[in-house]
Image: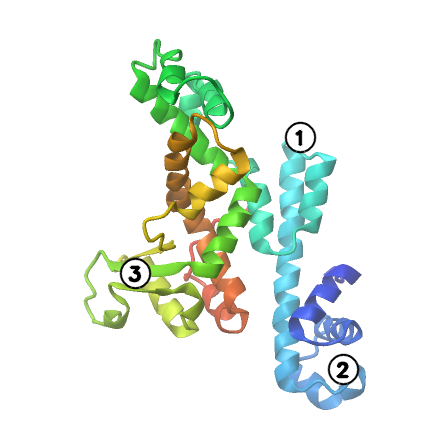
């Protein structure tokens, strides 16, 4: 097992609320096979007197950091094998502070099944999507009309294909994902809706409820995710708009400015948020909001479907 570097140890120490030297000493002892009770009782001189509670927190932080560094190495290797690793991307991957940011960077390079956006690109609608995300004369319908031919029978089909491409582009953009995550962390609401039979009634308290993400306690999160995995409920994460524009729309407009395709683009922005971004950022948000309550719960086997291994 490779020892953690100075930067990683500083992050661990900050998370656990101890000194870097303490974190390094504990990391060395744990790697050598010492247990937390043993270290707490017989190695106080090396830990600076850290008690069992602080040592447990430090152990969890060290495990999480090693997992992050292992994942970082796997992502770098995967992108490099594809021949797409640029100096800028390598630097961004190396500086990613958490798993969520790392996965946002890797998402465009994951091998995946053919998407609706891929099919739209094959029909020649890539340039239309790019134009709709920028500045152009006329209306979206007028622009889309110039792409009607062959596999694109009408304007509606052209705009639907362009929407699929725009949606995937927005969902794969690390900047957009980061902004959406910040909005959701500040005002996101978790909604659980019954979709299946709760035979034993064990999830009765978690059906058809909505509450702020920041106020969901760990035990309720565990029950909600398990209910979802068993097909009893569907989980959603969104923000209340009170009739105003959805945050996803404001983010897209802020990144692209105002143009003739603004209304169309704003509407297209809602789709990637709900279908692509929300399932990906929901667990990561839960982890970041309440690390003491959530980390062990949400990372337990079977709680959240894995979608993070390079393929």
Q: Nearer the viewer, residue 142 or 191?
A: 142
Does dot 3 land on a helix, a strand or a loop?
Answer: strand
Image side of residue 191 versus residue 92, left or right: left
Which labelled disc corresponds to residue 162? none
Image location (x, y in percent) of residue 52: 64, 85
Residue 116 seen in render = no
Disc 1 crowd rating (10 Å Cα; few below 14, some 14-19, many 20+) is: few
Q: Quadrant of the C terminus?
A: top right
Image location (x, y in percent) of residue 113: 43, 33
Q: Nearer the viewer, mark 1 or mark 3?
A: 3
Q: CA distance from mark 1 to mark 2?
A: 44 Å
Disc 3 crowd rating (10 Å Cα; few below 14, some 14-19, many 20+) is: many
Residue 69 seen in render = yes
Q: Which residue is mark 2?
A: 47
Q: Which residue is mark 1?
A: 83
Image location (x, y in percent) of residue 20: 77, 71
- Residue drawn at (30%, 13%), measured in percent from left and top? 153
Q: Nearer the viewer, mark 3 or mark 2?
A: 3
Q: Which residue is mark 3?
A: 192
């Amino acid at each position: 097992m490779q020892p953690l570097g100075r930067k990683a140890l500083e992050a661990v120490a900050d998370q656990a609320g101890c000194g870097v030297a303490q974190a390094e000493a504990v990391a060395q002892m744990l790697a050598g096979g010492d247990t937390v009770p043993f270290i707490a009782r017989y190695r106080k001189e090396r830990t600076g007197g850290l008690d069992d509670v602080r040592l447990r927190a430090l152990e969890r932080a060290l495990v999480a950091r090693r997992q992050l560094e292992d994942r970082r190495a796997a992502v770098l290797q995967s992108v490099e094998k594809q021949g797409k690793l640029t100096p800028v991307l390598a630097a961004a991957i190396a500086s990613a502070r958490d798993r969520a940011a790392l996965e946002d960077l890797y998402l465009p390079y994951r091998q995946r099944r053919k998407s609706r956006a891929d099919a739209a690109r094959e029909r020649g609608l890539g340039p239309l999507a790019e134009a709709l995300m920028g500045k152009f004369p006329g209306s979206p319908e007028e622009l889309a009309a110039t792409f009607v031919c062959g596999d694109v029978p009408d304007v509606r089909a052209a705009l639907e294909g362009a929407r699929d491409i725009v949606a995937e582009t927005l969902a794969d953009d690390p900047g957009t994902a980061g902004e959406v995550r910040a909005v959701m962390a500040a005002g996101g609401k978790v909604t659980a809706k019954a979709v299946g039979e709760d035979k034993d009634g064990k999830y009765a308290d978690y059906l058809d409820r909505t509450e702020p993400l920041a106020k969901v306690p760990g035990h309720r999160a565990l029950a909600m995710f398990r209910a979802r995995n068993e097909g009893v409920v569907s989980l959603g994460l969104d923000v209340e708009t009170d009739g105003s524009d959805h945050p996803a729309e404001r983010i897209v407009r802020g990144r692209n400015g105002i143009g003739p395709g603004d209304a169309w683009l704003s509407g297209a922005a809602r789709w990637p948020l709900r279908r692509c971004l929300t399932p990906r950022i929901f667990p990561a948000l839960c982890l970041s909001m309440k690390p003491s309550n959530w980390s062990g719960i949400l990372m337990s086997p079977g709680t959240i479907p894995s979608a993070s291994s390079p393929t």
